[in-house]
Image: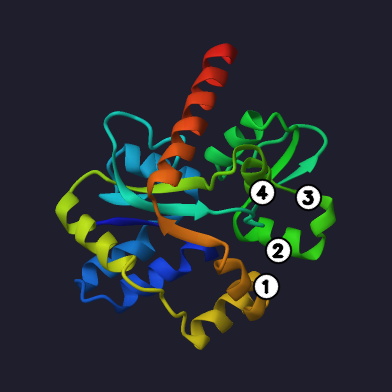
Amino acid sequence: MVFGKIDYINLLPFHVFLKRASLPNAFKRSCEHQKSVPSSINRKFRKRVVDAAFISSIESKRKSITPLPIGIVAQKNVKSVILKKGEAKRDPASATSNMLARVLDLQGEVFIGDRALKLYLQEPDAYIDLAQIWHDKYHLPFVFARLCVNERQSFYKKLCAKFVQRPIKIPNYILKNYATKRGISEHNIKEYLKLISYSIGRKEQKALFIFLKKAKRLQKSSS
């Protein structure tokens, strides 16, 4: 079993959950070996280098992919997917966030992940929070990624069910480690994680449908 790990703070609760779970050590080691940014994990998943991973929503629409009902969700604002108005410039680490800017008809430079969070916290008035704009427009959450599987579907389904059963408490030593490495205070990490949810229910499915439909229309018009 090989899991593709996106090492962003927004997935910290899931990685703490995996660390604590009664799982084979080989599986836990695989998470560290296949660690990368979302766009790279997307490619590894397509090539079946990894059995499962959180895949960008825009990528997860392919018919060959089996998505599970958890993902990376912003109910309103998110702070880690932002745009600085000006010349259009994509974040090479992302697929969904770049498309989200297009769907919202916003032009500028897109930033995602922990780097974006740090930029936003330093100068919030300089950036547009894309999840907040989406919510203002559609009154729905935004799903940035879905957990998808190539193999061992029943194993990952059980894992998902256990993950969403109760909130995951992040140990202080892990918080301190991330705060030091990412240059973001422990307090701000805790506050940021309150903005992230993981279950994909009816509202999230509706939001996905709207986003993917609009993205498809844009892709057709530009091809």
Confirm or deny contact between disc 1 and disc 3 (CB under 8 A).
Answer: no
Measured along the vertical axis of the image, is residue 97 above or below residue 223? below
Residues 152 and 141: in front is: 141
Drawn side of residue 44 relative to residue 138, left or right: left
Confirm or deny contact between disc 2 and disc 1 (CB under 8 A).
Answer: yes
Front disc: 3 or 2: 3
Q: Position of residue 37 (x, y in %)?
A: 50, 51
Q: Could you give the CA–CA distance between mark 1 and mark 3, rounded to whole angstroms?
A: 17 Å
Q: Secondary structure at mark 1?
A: loop
Binning the other alpha carbons within 10 Å of mark 3 as few (below 14), some (14 to 19) or many (20 upward) gives: many
Q: Which residue is mark 1?
A: 184
Using the rendered view, name the quadrant where residue 135 is placed.
top right
Q: Which residue is mark 4?
A: 132
Confirm or deny contact between disc 3 and disc 2 (CB under 8 A).
Answer: no
Of label 1 and label 3, which has the lower sequence position?
Answer: 3
Front disc: 4 or 3: 4
